[in-house]
Image (cartoon, rainbow, N blue to C red):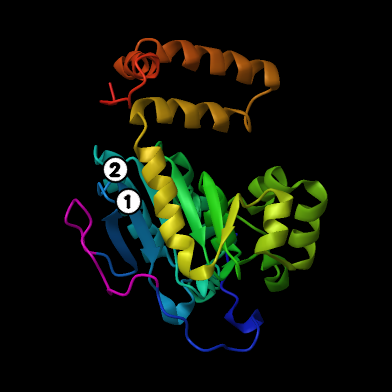
Amino acid sequence: MALSLRALLRPAQAPARLLLRAPARLCSAGTQFQYLVVEKKGAKQNVGVIQLNRPKALNALCDGLMNEMNQALDSFEKDPHVGAIVITGSEKAFAAGADIKEMQNRTFQECYGGNFLAHWNRVSLVRKPVIAAVNGYALGGGCELAMMCDIIFAGEKAQFGQPEILLGTIPGAGGTQRLTRAVGKSLAMEMVLTGDRISAQEAKEAGLVSKIYPVEKLLEEAISCGEKIAGNSKLVTAMAKEAVNAAFEMTLTEGNKMEKRLFHATFATDDRKEGMAAFVEKRKANFTDH
């Protein structure tokens, strides 16, 4: 589940500057956002960047923000020039959780009948690779949002946690499931039952994070990784992502069978032919996503 923990965080620090400063931007489809800054970055403008932009609320994940997130993701998913997506926040907070004021008066009937938070899962269903660039607090729903992404890069001062227990509830957007798969039962259980946070270094040692960068370099490095991914065949990249994700859903035998089917499927693509021809001819491959 997700929560906003302003009252539970340490004493206020000096305001951190945002990585992207504009109050709103247009995405490729021309949609203007209230809670996000949405742009295309990279030398070839092939990396979609979504920045959470609710600084006064430490990027708390309200319903409007998550609806806009889904719109931005859909736009980048349909854009043939975008090969990877980066989700980030500010230097102080990736996202400190969900908007508790928005959910505190909900009833069981409303939550269960309306399948509350179900639309948050859109991030995990995007076929293009998604990179989370996490600076500052990634707590509750913020941590869950990061874990829905395919790759997590962290700034040196990032903190991760699932403190829902301190508000009398439990994670409800994948926290108990994805965290356990990422860091193992013992650490996940400790974090969920105590509400304690872990540092960027602890997150990396546990396998939750793949790279740690200086705060001011984080977004640049995430975009650079996105550019590398976008330079490959988008078609084959989607197959590779599907195969890796299958490891979390299938037995080893079933996963290996799926991998073989996807591997064989690459031999029906022009990009597989081009990639191997380029290797043999000692030149750079020119992928066309076919």
Relative horizontal placement of residue 99, taking residue 8 as reference (left or right): left
Q: Position of residue 93 (x, y in %)?
A: 51, 72
Which of the two residues, 282 or 91, is positioned nearer the viewer here? 282
Question: In the rendered image, which quarter is residue 96 located in?
Answer: bottom right
Look at the numbered discs 2 and 1 and tell me whether their residues touch, using CB distance below 8 Å.
yes
Residue placed farthest to the front in the image? 282
Where does the magenta region start and end? 19-32
Can residue 287 be found in the magenta stretch? no
Q: Amino acid at mark 1?
A: Gly
Q: Give the left or right position of residue 127, taking residue 199 as reference.
A: left
Residue shown at 58%/70% (left/top)? 137
Left or right of 201 on screen, residue 280: left
Q: Is residue 26 magenta?
A: yes
Q: Which residue is mark 2?
A: 82
Going from the N terminus, do you reach mark 2 or mark 1 first? 1
Identity of the residue drawn at 49% across and 76% down: 58
Q: Is residue 19 above or below residue 268?
A: below
